[in-house]
Image (tube, rainbow, N blue to C red):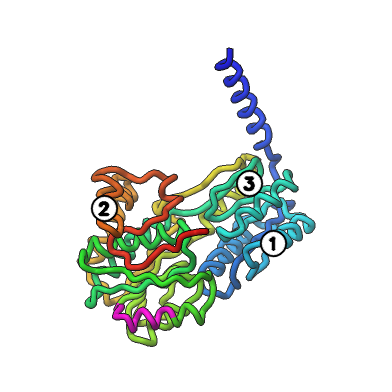
Amino acid sequence: MRKLLWVLVLVGVVMLGTAAWAFDPIPAQELKIGFVYVGPVGDGGWSYAHDQGRQAIEKEFPGIKTMYAESVPEGSDSVRVMESFVRNGAKLIFATSFGYMDQVQEVAKKHPDVIFMHCSGYKMMDNAGDYFGRMYQARYLSGMVAGSMTKSNIIGFPAAHPIPEVIRMINAFTLGVRKMNPQAVVKVVWLYSWFDPAKEKEATKALIDAGADVIGMHADSGATAQAAEEAGVYVIGYNNDMSRFAPTKCLTSSVWDWNVIYKDIVQKVIDGTWKPENIWWGMKTGIVKLTPYSKDVQEEVKSQVAAEQEKIFNDQWDVFTGSIKDQSGKVVVPEGQRMSDKDLLSFSWFVEGVEGEIPKSN
């Protein structure tokens, strides 16, 4: 009897959830969309890339109206911005930074008739889903390029915040580095900021002073690339093509093409087929990619990267497939075993080859 009751409860929950997921189609001419950006649209990186996606929506779907707010701090300010979008008629809101997660949940609960999509998070509701791309795949490939170019065996990496997303990117990059050069290390300096050009530049200079002759990055501006160019040091860009900031020293960049995923979500809203889901598309969809290589990257390296990319595209292999060791040399992922998405989304340790610490949360 108890088992039957549990079955009935679960069926009821599923039916309730299914009903709650039903949103009527919204014609493009009636659809208003709001975007919340953590940085300025002119940052040359993260927010700039998202805004390119917003502009692509307007071109793809004539009649749609979009609005955006830039440099919105993670916290209560984002609630105010999202509430303002709702008052102005938004029926779809994209919150484009991890730190907006709890605020999205708060506002979505108050407005069940509005659809919310949160970038890089993991919490969902009947009217709130998540979206991201497997950037770690492109990071791994760009790490291969970095590992092939270092002479000092020291690669610097200014990194925004010690959260699973950034830790995952550093680890993937390092695995790529050591695929090509097992002696190389990746030195990490935490910025504790997504967008702080002055701090990014100083951290880059400090890493170069510490012997780094190639620089990676996980920050939102072009300051890291600029500092590398000024110092005559190679750099691997992120978010957007950083060769605009380092025309002679940018080897390649791991970039986002957000219009790929934005067009898909908007089409579902228009069709009335949207439902809450955690979208995490891989590199073969085009959501993440590498920019063209600089002339300094050798053809042999390009061929090796292409071979690894083909394995990823064909789902023959993925970046976090064992054997993988942590910083202490302990095997954490056994040979042939692939880390689950759950483990990837909660990364809290560095792989072998990373020099730096992950601060313990209070």
Q: Position of residue 207 (x, y in %)?
A: 36, 79
Of marks 3 and 1, which one's residue comes earlier in the chain? 1
* Nearer the observer, 236 or 342: 342
Q: Earlier in the sequence, mark 1 or mark 2?
A: 1
Does 342 appear above or below 134? above
Residue 205's place in the image compared with 131, above or below, is: below
Q: Which residue is mark 3?
A: 128
Q: Earlier in the sequence, mark 3 or mark 2?
A: 3
Viewer-proximal residue, 300 or 77?
77
Query: Which residue is disc 1 drawn over?
Result: 76
Residue at left offset 27%, top offset 52%: 324
- Residue 208 drawn in magenta: yes
**In the rendered image, which quarter is residue 33 located in?**
bottom right
Q: Position of residue 300 (x, y in %)?
A: 20, 66
Quadrant that contains the N terminus: top right
The furthest residue to the front:
362
Q: Nearer the viewer, residue 286 or 167?
A: 167
Q: Which residue type does callout 2 highlight?
A: Lys
- The amino acid type of the residue labelled 1 equals Ser
Q: Residue at x 39, y 57 (%)?
A: 136
Horizontal side of 322 relative to 261 (left or right) equals left
Image position of 15 (left or right of 195) = right
Marker count (numbered): 3
> Which mark, residue 111?
none
For numbered disc 2, what is the local secondary structure?
loop
Front: mark 3 or 1: 1
How far is mark 1 from mark 2, CA to CA?
41 Å
Indicate which label's residue lies in the foreground, 1 or 2.
Answer: 2
- Three-letter amino acid code at disc 3? Ala
Mark 3–mark 2 Cα distance, whole angstroms, equals 39 Å
User: For the magenta stretch, what is the residue range?
Assistant: 203-213
Farthest top residue?
A: 1
